[in-house]
Image: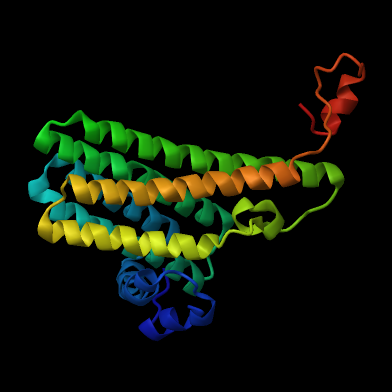
Amino acid sequence: MRRYSMRKIKESYNKKADNNSFILRNIFRPGSFYLAYLLMGAGVSANLATIFGLVVGLISLLFFAMSDKVFYLGTLFYILYWFFDFADGNIARVSNSASYYGKFLDGMVDALIETLLPLSIAIGLFIKEGDIFYIAVGTSISVSLLFAFFAINRISFFKRWIEIERGSGGNTKELNPLKSTRLPMKKIFNFQTDFKISLLLAATFTGMNKVLYIIFAISIFIWAVILIIAALQDARKNLRHARTSRLDARFTDQKQVLRKGQV
């Protein structure tokens, strides 16, 4: 891979367009420039950097789930995971290799790590205290996030389907339920992200306990509920369109139905 200077990497970033949270924008983003520089010097592509981020994120979850004694390592690797999460985008921009596949891969990694995070910490607390309460809460939060991510992607899929049948390409704002809702989703996400990271840092020094974990879990659960509400609002507003099933007995020309992309 071609070698790029630190100046080029920083210049590829549009600071005015960055609406991420305070911690992400002022700590992880600047630090990711240096990580991107090192990775590109080693010939690492943007997508490979995403895979490295996945590995680092999984290691952080493993440390969280092991015991309270290595909780600090879980936090350390979780922070490193965030650096990789920004570094892959830096590499893609400066090398002009950004693609929708890369964005898809990055989103899949984020969804996996963030979904398993509450459960992994719960497992570590269960090992420490033997209280099944943590497993119940951690599982519930992780399932709530998983359902929220599924709902968002499912609605986006059907909205795209409707646009194709109409012969209209649509736009990303119309297809993304998080951008069509009146709820201030980005502001809520930014607050929740900084709050979550701050709690993990606090727990690193004080030790994760039941009170901190409940606060941590509630913040993530509220975010999951908001995601689900936004998705359902969007579905109620945009998916009320008549459709024809290929199994509908009123239509005998199955080929014609299939050509229209209906199931």
Q: Residue at x 36, y 34 (%)?
A: 140
Residue 64 seen in this snapshot: yes
Q: Residue at x 33, y 61 (%)?
A: 195
Q: Quadrant of the C terminus?
A: top right
Q: Is residue 61 above or below residue 190?
A: above
Could you say which quadrant of the image residue 199 lies in?
bottom left
Residue 259 picture quarter: top right
Q: Residue furthest top?
A: 249
Q: 251 or 203: nearer the eye?
A: 203
Number of numbered discs visible in the structure rendering: 0
Q: Position of residue 116 (x, y in %)?
A: 33, 42
Location of residue 223 in the rendering, given as x and y in whole percent from the top left corner: 44, 51
Query: Which quadrant of the figure contains the N terminus?
Result: bottom left
- Vertical comparison of 145 with 33: above or below: above
Front one among 166 and 97 = 166
| Rendering coords of residue 261 (x, y %) | 79, 33
**Extreme-left residue of the structure:** 69
Q: Residue at image x 15%, y 58%?
A: 204
